[in-house]
Structure formats: C-alpha cells, structure tokens
Image (tube, helix red, strand yellow):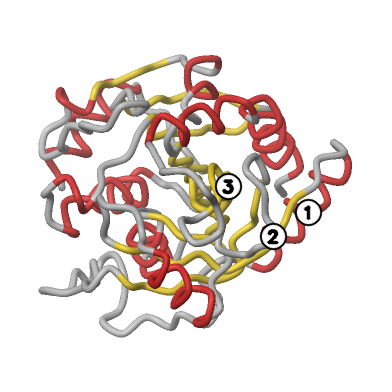
Amino acid sequence: MEETIKFIQEKISGQQPEIGIILGSGLGELADEYCEIAIPYNDIPNFIKSTVKGHKGRLVFSDIAGRQVVMMQGRNHFYEGHSIQEVTYPVKVMKKLGVKILILTNAAGGVNETFSPGDLMLITDHINCMGTNPLIGENDETLGERFPDMTEVYKKSLISLAEHCANELQIHVKKGVYLANSGPSYETPAEIHMARTLGADAVGMSTVPEAIVANYCGMNVLGISCISNTASSTGGSALSHKEVIETAGKIKSSFKNLILKIIEELN
C-alpha cells in the first residue's frame, strides 16, 4: 500500500481527492471529458489491469466544480480471475488518498419488471450472492474495524441528494436493491426468478465488493445502476455485452449530467 500511495502522490503533486467515482461498462466518457492527470493501471504498483471491453483501465484525477475527484475509468471484476481482495484494493487506495465520498456506477440487468433498458436506478441496498466477502483475511485496523455495521451502506442523504439533482435535471430515476453474482455468465431465468423473490430490482457482477470495502473504510457511498437490459426471464432475446455497452452509450449524457450535478450540490 505504501508503495502504491507514494507512486500516485508523486504523479498528482500533492492533490488530495475527496470524491471517488468508479465508472462501469460504457460509462467512462466522464473521465475522458474531465481528465487532468491519467495514470494507467498497468503503471501503478500493485494494481491489476482491466481486461473488459468498455473499460479503459486508468486512474483519472480532475477538478470538478471545485472539488478534487479521482475516477476509476474501468473496474476490475472477480470473474476475471482476480481475488476479491485485488478487485477492491483500489477502494482502499482511494481511502488512503483522502476520498470521503465514493460514487459507484454499473450497468445492470433489470429484475424489476417495471424497469426498462436505459433507466437509472439509485441503489438503496444490496444482496451479496458472490459467494465471498472482500473483508475475509487479516484485518487492517488503519482502514476499519473487524466487524463493520452494514445497516446503511448506501447513504440515505446521498440518495436524497441524487433524487433532488435528477428532478432538477428532469431525469427520471428509479430506486432499488442491487444483487451481485460472480458472473461472467448471465443469469438463468430461474436465477432471475430467485433474485426477484429475494427482493432484488437489478442484478450485476460488480459494485457490491467495492461498496462493502468503502463502507468498512468509513466512506459515504452512492450507487447508481444503468439498467442496460431486461434480465433473461423478462426479455425475449439473448443477452450480450454489446447490448450492455450500447444501452449505456445511449444514456451517457443523462448519466454524466447527473453525476456532475451531484458533485456540484455536495456540501
């Protein structure tokens, strides 16, 4: 960790980001537009390279509305073969850099039958079905306590702020529970039925590990899902990653404007 932090701090010349954003599939344009310093994951000691299409794989630092921001332009996933601790390592790095608020974004399948591709969903809670937990292993007391409370992982005040900003921009947003599976295969119709029965509104392959670690580190978390497709039991056609990227691309303007508005309105 010390090696990673030292390398990054030398690149950013004393900047101290207070807001972190993890940009999901097809949502990386924000980092392209607001890029002052970009560091490829490949160059950062102890980081791993993202291998998923639609993820550039770099750490982007910028000033947005007078706030210091660090963005992960592409995330790493458990299904790529990395350990869950490797996947969430960048969140711990953000904490050490000074990040207090973490905005998590993703592309997700719609489980709630009232959701449509292109909807934005504010995450109110999550269900971890990944079969593991990123906090397993020796605990680092400098980051958080051994048994963190999970009552309010997604900060209600941030959800309210995001709703207010969406209303100001006339963007209709949904709210719901995100269920995470390990992937990389999409869910079967029976698995989607199970997710719906459990109370999930959207399903995906990321976000939950980062949210767990950010909550453990004492960060305030906001999660936003782009509903990129209807899940397999509600749609009639086969699912593809291409469809996910295309749908995210169609709403990227609304998504970007919402994120910018939220940053502007943060206290």
Write the residue at 39% across / 16% down: 37
User: Does residue 211 lie above or below 22 as drawn?
Assistant: below
Write the residue at 63% across / 66% down: 176
* Amino acid bearing label 2: Ile
Q: Is residue 71 rendered to the left or right of residue 58?
A: right
* Amino acid bearing label 1: Glu
Query: Are the residues flagged by discs 2 and 3 in contact, CB closer than 8 Å?
Result: no
**Closer-to-camera residue (245/253):** 245
* Label 2, residues with CA under 10 Å away: few <14, some 14-19, many ≥20: some
> Marks 1 and 3, Cα distance to the nearest angstrom?
17 Å
- Name the element at disc 1: helix
> Marks 2 and 3, Cα distance to the nearest angstrom?
17 Å
Residue 92's spot in the image, x, y percent? 29, 53
Query: Are the residues flagged by discs 1 and 2 in contact, CB closer than 8 Å?
Result: yes
* Amino acid bearing label 3: Ile
- Name the element at disc 3: strand
User: Does residue 81 lie above or below 3 as drawn?
Assistant: below
Task: Between label 1 and label 3, give the one nearer the viewer.
Answer: 3
Residue 157's spot in the image, x, y percent? 71, 64
Could you tell me if residue 220 is visible in this image?
Answer: no
Residue 241's spot in the image, x, y percent? 37, 35
Write the residue at 54% across / 45% down: 229
> Marks 1 and 2, Cα distance to the nearest angstrom?
6 Å
**Closer-to-camera residue (65/85):** 85
Q: Name the residue under label 3.
A: 227
Q: Name the residue under label 1.
A: 163
- Name the element at disc 2: helix
Q: Name the residue under label 2.
A: 159
Write the residue at 85% across / 36% down: 169
Q: Is residue 262 rendered to the left or right of residue 220?
A: right
**Closer-to-camera residue (198/253):** 198
